[in-house]
Image (cartoon, rainbow, N blue to C red):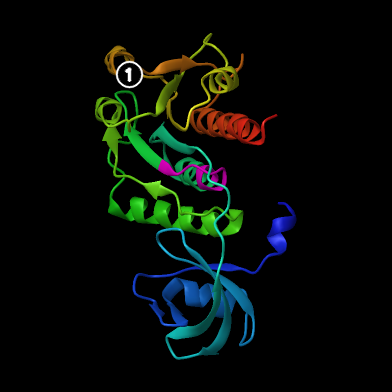
């Protein structure tokens, strides 16, 4: 946590929630505002729209099923950072929940769950996807990120390799490869996709698909890491290196 944590608490806006100079907050966000944080009329808040626009506001009153917020201004966006996509193999239960939550905190713009040949879980189902999106939204508010991390439906490695956005450096984690931080500093990308496999690693067909799409092998150090550890380490190293580039250090 840093000093920015002292800022007003943030709440997500549903589409159409703004009407002129006021907005309505309902559902789970209302519960968090009124019953968990115990905020009352007059409390300063910040509101995040789906496109990342952020507003300053103040609670005017509580109705039965929503809070009415006076919008006092629109906040200036922070400095734009390079876009990071994390494409990680689906793993079991709470470990995947942890991975999604921390990926959002670390600033991933998008999360692509990978159905790999050697993963145990293939289709997590709509309920788990909805849970991951709730976790990502909560992590966005806590970490002061501009936008909630997008969570795509599960995809295969071959499909992900075909869908890498243009002008995006795509990498996959591998043993004995050039260190990830060194690759980032050398290439200075404006966008990155990081692919992390399951604990049994990608299979030959998946490596071939990534190689054909121009993915670069990167290393995370000498130790063997669990899937979620490798994914979060890769994301953290990437974000740190990109931040150094932004700051000219």
Q: Which corner quadrant of the image does residue 119 belong to?
A: top left
Q: Which corner quadrant of the image does residue 16 belong to?
A: bottom left
Task: Say which of 175 and 46 sits in front.
Answer: 46
Can residue 197 be spotted in the picture? no
Can residue 22 be spotted in the picture? yes
Q: Would residue 132 appear left or right of 38 to someone viewing this image?
A: left
Q: Would residue 78 appear left or right of 148 to someone viewing this image?
A: right
For label 1, the residue is: 210
Q: Which corner quadrant of the image does residue 40 belong to?
A: bottom right
Q: Magenta stretch containing residue 103, yes or no?
A: yes
For the point 39% across and 49% down, the residue is 150
Q: Magenta stretch containing residue 180, yes or no?
A: no
Q: Callout 1: helix, strand or loop?
A: helix
* Residue 220 x %, y %: 57, 20
For the point 41% across and 39% down, the residue is 92
For the point 61% across and 29% down, the residue is 241
Which residue reaches farthest right? 3
Task: Say which of 199 and 185 sits in front.
Answer: 185
* Residue 112 x %, y %: 36, 38
Q: Is residue 222 above or below residue 76?
A: above
Q: Which residues are magenta?
A: 102-110
* Residue 147 x %, y %: 47, 54
Task: Say which of 173 and 7 sits in front.
Answer: 7
Q: Is residue 242 above or below residue 32?
A: above
* Residue 176 x %, y %: 53, 8
- Count neighbours of disc 1 (C-alpha within 10 A) and say few if under 14, some if 14 to 19, many if 20 or more: many
Task: Say which of 107 and 32 sits in front.
Answer: 107
Which residue reaches farthest top? 176
In what quadrant of the picture does the C terminus appear?
A: top right
């Amino acid at each position: 946590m840093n000093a920015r944590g002292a800022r007003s608490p943030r709440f997500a806006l549903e589409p159409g929630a703004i009407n002129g100079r006021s907005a309505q907050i309902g559902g789970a966000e209302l519960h968090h505002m009124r019953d968990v944080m115990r905020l009352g009329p007059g409390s300063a808040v910040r509101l995040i729209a789906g496109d990342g626009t952020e507003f300053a506001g103040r609670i005017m009153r509580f109705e039965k099923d929503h809070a009415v917020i006076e919008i006092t201004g629109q906040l200036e966006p922070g400095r734009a950072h390079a876009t990071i996509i994390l494409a990680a193999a689906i793993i079991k239960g709470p470990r995947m929940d942890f991975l999604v939550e921390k990926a959002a905190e670390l600033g991933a713009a998008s999360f692509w769950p990978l159905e790999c040949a050697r993963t145990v879980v293939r289709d997590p189902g709509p309920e788990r996807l909805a849970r991951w999106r709730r976790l990502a939204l909560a992590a966005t508010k806590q970490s002061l990120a501009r936008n909630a991390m997008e969570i795509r439906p599960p995809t295969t490695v071959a499909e992900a390799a075909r869908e890498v956005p243009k002008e995006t450096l795509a990498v996959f984690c591998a043993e004995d490869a050039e260190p990830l931080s060194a690759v980032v500093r050398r290439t200075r990308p404006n966008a990155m996709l990081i692919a992390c496999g399951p604990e049994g690693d990608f299979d030959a067909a998946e490596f071939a698909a990534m190689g054909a799409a121009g993915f670069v092998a990167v290393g995370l150090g000498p130790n063997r890491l669990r899937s979620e550890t490798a994914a979060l380490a890769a994301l953290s190293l990437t974000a740190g290196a990109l931040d150094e580039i932004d700051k000219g250090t």
